[in-house]
Image (spheres, grey):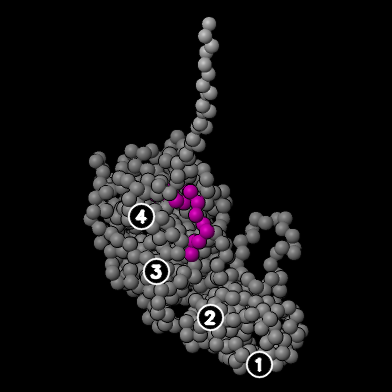
């Protein structure tokens, strides 16, 4: 993680300076202050570069004087639309523009109106600077990033440092999720995943790991049918953070559940080859729950939380579950497996039932890269949100807007539920056709929550980004860690909102733009098959007409 420090504003002796400015700040007091220190070079350079302060605009002035190597101007847009997400974006855009600088200062005084504005700038810088380079062994030194630390200049460094403590813990949780989701499947199999989660015990999280025999004894027939084709044994991990009075045995925790398919071939209902490498991140739901638990423990959240993840690998083999098989879930309900690529819901079914029976939580939220159909419906800007509780759904959406992780409410209903009726079992694991595939998947999950307030977040379209975003480098996004942390903070710890959410249509700060692949679109079965076009044979070339000839008379 970048080294972050806060200080009063002064001209750095060397390195780079970043100056975020709103459109209204051009020619103002703050710009004039720096322009005087730099001998007029700031005003001349900004004018020559036609810097207007537009949101996301970045201009670099090299060797502007005062011993600086570069001065980066970052646009904030209109001042009345500035919010914490905009402050974070400014910090992220600053890091992206700093090139090979080793040290930099960011003047955050133009960003304000709420407590923690300077810390928000620091958070954006830290989130953008993250990089997964564990397996790079031949990278040239000149290609490696050099930025090691950022000093944020502000009016009250002590207050900013206090605000930064909780944000740093959240960043650590985001980084854990990004790391887990980025790992290749030959490294991060279910046992390895479970072992890594044991490290959360250092933060005070209680970690309990269930192996193959434990799950067999519990009767996890739905989850185990997914893993039976793989050489890698399954795991379920239960994580508990007791942030209130641990002596209160009758208190209801809140629960978060994640799908953790460490690699998904589709099983016997095998996926298309194109893009199958992307299915290493079919465990992003579990990764998000792990990162959330780390964030909550790291900032000592005053709340009781349980996090459960079901970890399996879905592979085809002679022992794999077959289309048409019937399995018995932990709840006792039977399931006809129609499509083995609709495996995530089979994993979650048992984990949800177990969570409800053992912990009786106040509510459950599950996250899963569950269906390609949700990408067809919503693209990569929103996750799909399904819920049986209006209040919970509204709180999730509001928390998402405040951190730029957007969720769109999707319907549930009896008509969709009838689509998963089986002729020989209590239900089947996919609907009867391509219509409403993400909805029928959610209806399936709802059958295992036993009346508990519940929300399902289908994150297939937002878990992985195909291009850089202001605070998210290309790759694993860790979508959901910050949303759920904000949900807990504002509604279960009594913490007041840090800043009002701007009116109007919100923009996604974290999305999966550019990450489309046939493998993820095929996730969840027939609902998304329409997205994968069948190859069309080229038309046969027209046969040239034979010229007419007259046979001579004899």
Which residue sits at x=64%, y=58%?
134
Q: Where on the picture, by quarter, is residue 12?
A: bottom right
Rounded to the nearest angstrom, the CA distance separating label 1 from label 2 is 20 Å
Cβ atoms under marks 1 and 3 closer than 8 Å: no
Rounded to the nearest angstrom, the CA distance separating label 1 from label 3 is 49 Å
Which residue sits at x=43%, y=73%?
506
Dot in front, 1 or 2: 2
Cβ atoms under marks 2 and 4 closer than 8 Å: no
Q: Identify the mark at residue 77; answer none if there is no mark.
A: 2
**Tag 3's secondary structure?**
strand
Asked if the magenta segment contains residue 514, the reply would be yes
Rounded to the nearest angstrom, the CA distance separating label 1 from label 4 is 55 Å
Dot in front, 1 or 4: 1
Rounded to the nearest angstrom, the CA distance separating label 3 from label 2 is 39 Å
Dot in front, 2 or 4: 2
Q: Earlier along the polypeptide chain: callout 1 or callout 3?
A: 1
Q: Earlier along the polypeptide chain: callout 4 or callout 3?
A: 3
Q: Position of residue 266 (x, y in %)?
A: 44, 44
Q: Position of residue 87 (x, y in %)?
A: 53, 79
Q: Position of residue 44 (x, y in %)?
A: 70, 86
Q: Identify the mark at residue 33; answer none if there is no mark.
A: 1
**Tag 4's secondary structure?**
helix
Q: Mark 4 — residue?
A: 438
Q: As rendered, which of 353 and 94 lies closer to the eye? A: 94
């Amino acid at each position: 993680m970048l080294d972050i420090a806060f200080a009063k504003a002064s001209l750095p002796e060397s390195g780079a300076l970043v100056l975020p400015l709103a459109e209204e700040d051009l020619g103002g007091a703050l710009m004039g202050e720096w322009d005087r220190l730099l001998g007029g070079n700031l005003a001349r350079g900004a004018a020559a570069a036609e810097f207007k302060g537009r949101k996301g605009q970045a201009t670099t002035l090299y060797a502007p004087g005062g011993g600086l190597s570069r001065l980066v101007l970052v646009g904030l847009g209109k001042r009345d639309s500035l919010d914490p997400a905009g402050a974070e974006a400014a910090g992220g855009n600053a890091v992206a523009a700093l090139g090979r600088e080793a040290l930099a200062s960011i003047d955050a005084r133009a960003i304000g109106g709420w407590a923690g504005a300077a810390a928000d700038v620091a958070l954006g810088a830290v989130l953008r600077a993250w990089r997964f380079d564990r397996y790079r062994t031949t990278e040239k030194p000149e290609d490696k990033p050099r930025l090691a630390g950022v000093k944020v200049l502000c009016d009250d460094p002590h207050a900013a440092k206090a605000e930064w403590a909780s944000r740093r813990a959240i960043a650590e949780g985001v980084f854990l999720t990004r790391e887990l989701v980025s790992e290749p499947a030959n490294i991060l199999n279910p046992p390895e995943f479970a072992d890594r989660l044991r490290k959360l015990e250092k933060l005070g999280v209680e970690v309990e790991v269930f192996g193959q025999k434990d799950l067999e004894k519990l009767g996890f027939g739905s989850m185990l049918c997914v893993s039976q084709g793989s050489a890698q044994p399954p795991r379920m991990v239960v994580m508990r953070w007791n942030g209130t009075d641990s002596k209160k045995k009758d208190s209801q925790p809140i629960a978060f559940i994640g799908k953790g398919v460490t690699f998904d071939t589709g099983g016997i209902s095998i996926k298309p080859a194109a893009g199958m490498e992307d299915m290493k991140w079919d465990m992003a739901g579990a990764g998000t729950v792990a990162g959330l638990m780390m964030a909550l423990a790291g900032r000592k959240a005053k709340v009781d939380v349980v996090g459960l993840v079901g970890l399996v690998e879905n592979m085809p083999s002679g022992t794999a579950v077959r289309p048409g098989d019937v399995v018995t879930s932990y709840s006792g309900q039977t399931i006809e497996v129609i499509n083995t690529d609709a495996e995530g819901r089979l994993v979650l079914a048992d984990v949800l039932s177990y969570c409800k029976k053992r912990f009786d939580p106040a509510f459950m939220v599950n996250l899963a890269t569950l269906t390609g159909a949700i990408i067809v419906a919503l693209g990569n800007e929103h996750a799909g949100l399904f819920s049986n509780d209006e209040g919970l759904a509204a709180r999730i959406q509001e928390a998402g807007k405040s951190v730029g992780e957007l969720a769109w409410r999707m319907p549930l209903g009896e008509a969709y539920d009838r689509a998963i009726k089986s002729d020989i079992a209590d239900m089947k694991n996919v609907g009867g056709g391509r219509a409403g595939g993400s909805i029928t998947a959610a209806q399936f999950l709802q059958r295992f929550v036993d009346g508990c307030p519940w929300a399902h977040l289908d994150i297939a379209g937002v878990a992985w980004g195909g291009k850089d975003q202001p605070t998210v480098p290309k790759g694993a996004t860790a979508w959901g860690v910050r949303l759920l942390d904000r949900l807990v903070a504002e509604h279960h710890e009594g913490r007041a909102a840090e800043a009002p959410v701007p009116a109007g249509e919100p923009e996604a700060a974290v999305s999966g733009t550019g990450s489309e692949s046939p493998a993820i679109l095929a996730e969840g079965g027939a609902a998304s098959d329409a997205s994968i076009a069948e190859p069309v044979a080229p038309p046969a070339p027209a046969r040239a007409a034979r010229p007419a000839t007259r046979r001579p008379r004899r």
